[in-house]
Image (cartoon, rainbow, N blue to C red):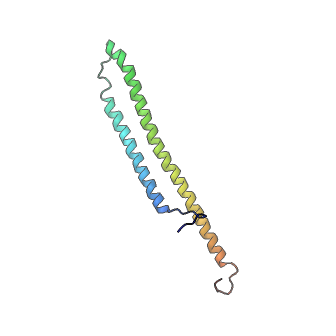
């Protein structure tokens, strides 16, 4: 059990979380790709050259682009969370490895009799 002066991390659980975040980001990208494909099927619904089209198409295009950009930004943010968590996991593993190495080194020093202290 960790006390107030210690830090505990479970690398296996963190890695599991990273895999889940990666899956979420893949799903988010798929959703955006599907959204763009579906919306593109309706882009000509107001027409192309009459007065209604001239009035509606620029706003529809702006809204479609804005929505796509927002979705892409969301997917990118999820990827960034996964990347940051992976970087933290590497740091944790490096720190744990260094600490374990130091413990093993210090347990072997000065102990020439084979006894325990």
Q: In which image quadrant can residue 41 be found?
A: top left
Judge whether 75 appears above or below 38 on screen: below
Q: Is residue 116 left or right of residue 57?
A: right
Residue at the image point whose x is 44% and y is 35% from the top: 70
Give percent across and percent down for residue 91: 57, 57
For this orientation, the residue located farthest to the right is: 110
Give percent across and percent down for residue 85: 51, 52
Residue at the image point whose x is 59% and y is 64% from the top: 6
Rendered-image quadrant of the C terminus: bottom right
Residue at the image point whose x is 36% and y is 40% from the top: 31
Give percent across and percent down for residue 112: 69, 84
Judge whether 57 appears above or below 12 on screen: above
Q: Is residue 35 left or right of residue 17?
A: left
Residue at the image point whose x is 36% and y is 20% from the top: 57
Q: In which image quadrant can residue 32 be found?
A: top left
Give percent across and percent down for residue 62: 41, 25
């Amino acid at each position: 059990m960790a006390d107030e002066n210690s830090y505990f991390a479970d690398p296996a659980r963190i890695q599991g979380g990273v895999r889940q975040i990666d899956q979420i980001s893949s799903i988010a990208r798929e959703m955006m790709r599907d959204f763009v494909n579906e919306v593109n099927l309706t882009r000509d619904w107001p027409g192309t050259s009459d007065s209604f089209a001239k009035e509606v198409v620029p706003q529809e295009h702006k809204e479609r682009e804005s929505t796509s950009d927002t979705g892409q930004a969301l997917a990118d943010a999820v990827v960034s969370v996964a990347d940051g968590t992976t970087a933290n996991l590497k740091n944790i593993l490096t720190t744990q490895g260094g600490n374990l190495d130091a413990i093993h080194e210090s347990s072997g020093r000065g102990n020439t009799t084979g006894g325990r202290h």
